[in-house]
Amino acid sequence: MSLTATQARALAWLVLAVAAWWLLGLLSPVLLPFVVAGVMAYALHPVVERLAARRVPAWLGAGLAIAVLMLLLLAVALMVVPVVTRQLPLLREQIPSLLEQFNAWLLPWLQRWGANVQIDVTLVRDLLRRLISGHEGQLVDGVLSSLRIGGSAVLAVLGNLVLMPIVAYYLLLDWNGLVGRLQALVPPRWQGRTQRFLGEADGVLGQYLRGQLLVMGLLAVFYTVALALVGLDLALPVGVFTGLAVFVPYLGFGLGLVLGLLAALLQFQTLSGVLLVGAVYAVGQVVESFFLTPRLVGERIGLHPIAVIFALMAFGHVLGFVGVLIALPASAVLLVAVRRLQALYLSSPLYTHAAPVRDGEG
C-alpha cells in the first residue's frame, strides 16, 4: 500500500518525535545541568541585551550576569548551611528533654481515659546519638552505596555546579545565533506561523518569570518579618531561604518548613513556640497557594490553579526533579499551543457544521 504525500510527512514527523523522546529518555541522567543552564541563560538574556544596548561587550555582560546570579546563590547557601550544621548537634541534646516534657504533659491526660502510653525517651536518645554523633559518614556512605554511585556522587554534584554556569555563559554569548540556527531548521512554509507561536510563548514565559520573581521576593519578606515577630533568632536566613526556595514548588516550601520548625524547637523548647512558627508557615502557604501564585503567576500565564497543580504532578512524574523545575514554564508554552488548537477547532467544520434536522425532530 502506497502512502500519500500527507501521510508520508505525518509518518516522518511521528518517527522523529518517537526518536526524540527515546533520546531524551536515554540522556536524562545527564540533562539536568544543561536544562538548568538553559533556564539560566533564558532568564538572564534580557539583562545581557540591556547591557549590550549600553555598549557593554557581550562577553562582559554575560560574565557579569552569571557572576551576580552565582553570588546571590552563594550568599543564600552561606546563610543556610551554617544554620543547619550548628543546629544538628543541638538537636541531639534538646529533643530528649523536650520529649520528657511532652510525656509529663501527655501522660496524666491519657491516664484519665485509662491509657498508659508514653514516648520511650531512652530509645529516641540512643537513635539520635547513632545518627548525629560520629556516624554521619557511615550514614552517608550507606545511602550512597544503596544508590550505587559511591564517592563519585560528590564529584558529580561539584562537577554540575561548575558546569552549569559555564554552559549558561556560552549559551548567553551565542544566544541570538543559536536561536537563528534553530529557526532555520523550520521548513520555510512554517516559519511565519512558528515565529508567531514562539513570540507568543516568549511573552508568556517572560510574564511567568517576572511573576515568579515577584512571588519569591514577597514571600522572602513575609517569612523574614513574620518569623522575626514571633521571636525567632534565625528569622533572616530561614525566611530568605524559604522565600527563594519556593521557585521549586512544594519541595522548597517543605525544606523551609523543616528548617524553621527545627530552629523553633531548639530556640523556644516549648510547644507554643513551635506552633507559632508552624502557624507562620501555614499562613504563608495559604497566601502563596491561593493568592500570590494564582494571581501573579497563574493569571499572568492564563493557568488555572488546578492546572498548575496538575502540571507539577504530571511533569514531576514523567521527568522527576527536572520536570518539577520546568513544569510551569513548559505548561506556559503548552498553553499557547492549546489556545491555537482551540481556535482551529472552533473554526473547523467539526464544530461549526450543524447536523441536518430530520423529519419529526425539533
Image (cartoon, rainbow, N blue to C red):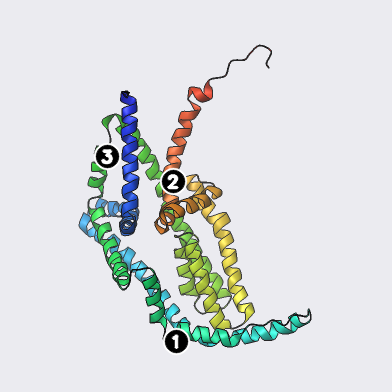
Disc with the residue nearer the chain's start (3 vs 2) = 3
Q: Quadrant of the N terminus?
A: top left
Q: Circle 3 is placed at which residue position?
A: 183
Is residue 4 toward the left or the right of residue 288 in the image? left
Q: CA distance from mark 1 to mark 3?
A: 58 Å
Label 2: how many Cα within 10 Å (few below 14, some 14–19, many 20+):
many
Q: Circle 2 is placed at which residue position?
A: 332
Q: Quadrant of residue 226?
A: bottom right
Nearest the camera: 153 or 53?
153
Q: Circle 1 is placed at which residue position?
A: 133
Q: Do the residues bearing badges 1 and 3 touch, measured as CB atoms within 8 Å?
A: no
Disc with the residue nearer the chain's start (1 vs 2) = 1
Residue at 57% across, 78% down: 231
In this view, the mark in front (1 or 2) = 1
Q: CA distance from mark 3 to mark 2?
A: 20 Å
Q: Is residue 287 visible?
A: yes
Q: How many marks?
A: 3
